[in-house]
Image (tube, grey):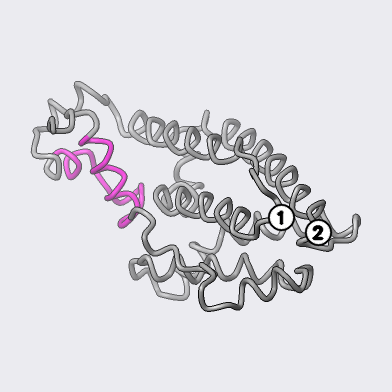
Amino acid sequence: MAAPKTRDRVLESSLELFNVRGVSSVTTAEIARTVGINEGNLYYYFQKKEQLVTALFDAFEAEIRVTAAGDLADPTNPAEYIGYLRGWFATAWRYRFVQRDSAALFEMAPALRERAAAMIADAEAASRRVLGQVIEAGLLTVEPDMLEPLLANVWIVSSHWIDHLALRRHGRELGPADLDWGFRQVLALFLPYLSEELRGWMSSPAAPFASISEARV
């Protein structure tokens, strides 16, 4: 297997450092040392940190849009919707600095603010479409006037649970077990609307209720 290209190694190292330490705390010199190159070589690929941040946001947005574009092959199968949610969480976890450090990102790369707003709007529309499939399949019963509040709350919790937990942990690094915790908070929002079938499926020992610790870190 060929070794990763230098640009790819720069991006992967930057992603790991940003996830652990935060965008504002990581310098280009530190990124270069982690990759094993000098800063001059780093500047050949990325002349400033803003370009690095933008490249990682590009990758994050691309993965989110692929996930959002997916439909449920069988909306009557509870595992399909759980899998859809897992996809969101796996991507959000891999690029967790984007949500946690959004203020710093937009200050460093202001053009990302408009792109992020458009991405969120599209993601919400995709969530609305897929949730509609689940409701139509009879797995959820949601009154029409509660659908938008439910979607809003799901988005808020799934987008900001990392900030909340990091604050509670006094800045200590989060791990895959925390990802499981965040996933449970989102699933809890659906509990009042679950059909008996789906409620029983989620409580069964065999159901992948929230264990997504295999997601890439």
Q: Which mark is residue 138?
A: 2
Q: Is residue 44 above or below residue 26?
A: above
Crowd rating for badge 2 (residues with CA inside 10 Å; few <14, some 14–19, many 20+): some
Horizontal side, residue 78 vs residue 170: left or right: right
Q: Which residue is mark 1?
A: 76
Magenta-drawn stretch, dominant element (helix, strand or loop): helix
Identify which residue, 217 or 139, lies in the foreground. 139
Q: Which mark is residue 204?
A: none
Horizontal side, residue 182 vs residue 214: left or right: right
Image coords of residue 127 (percent x, y): 69, 46
Quadrant containing the N terminus in the rendered view: top left
Q: Is residue 89 above or below residue 179?
A: above
Q: Is residue 103 above or below residue 185?
A: above
Quadrant containing the C terminus in the rendered view: bottom left
Image coords of residue 54 (percent x, y): 41, 31
Identify which residue, 122 or 24, lies in the foreground. 122
Horizontal side, residue 98 vs residue 140: left or right: left
Horizontal side, residue 22 vs residue 26: left or right: right
Image coords of residue 185 (percent x, y): 59, 70
At mark 1, the secondary structure is loop
Which residue: 58% across, 51% down? 84
Task: Please tell me in which quadrant of the rendered image residue 139 appears.
Answer: bottom right
Which kind of residue does numbered mark 1 sit on? Thr
Q: Are dots 2 and 1 in contact, CB under 8 Å?
A: yes
Which kind of residue does numbered mark 2 sit on? Gly
Which residue: 35% across, 47% down? 23
Whether residue 60 is in magenta: the answer is no
Which residue: 35% across, 66% down? 175
Q: Earlier in the sequence, mark 2 or mark 1?
A: 1
Task: Please tell me in which quadrant of the rendered image residue 187 appears.
Answer: bottom right
Residue range in magenta is 9-32
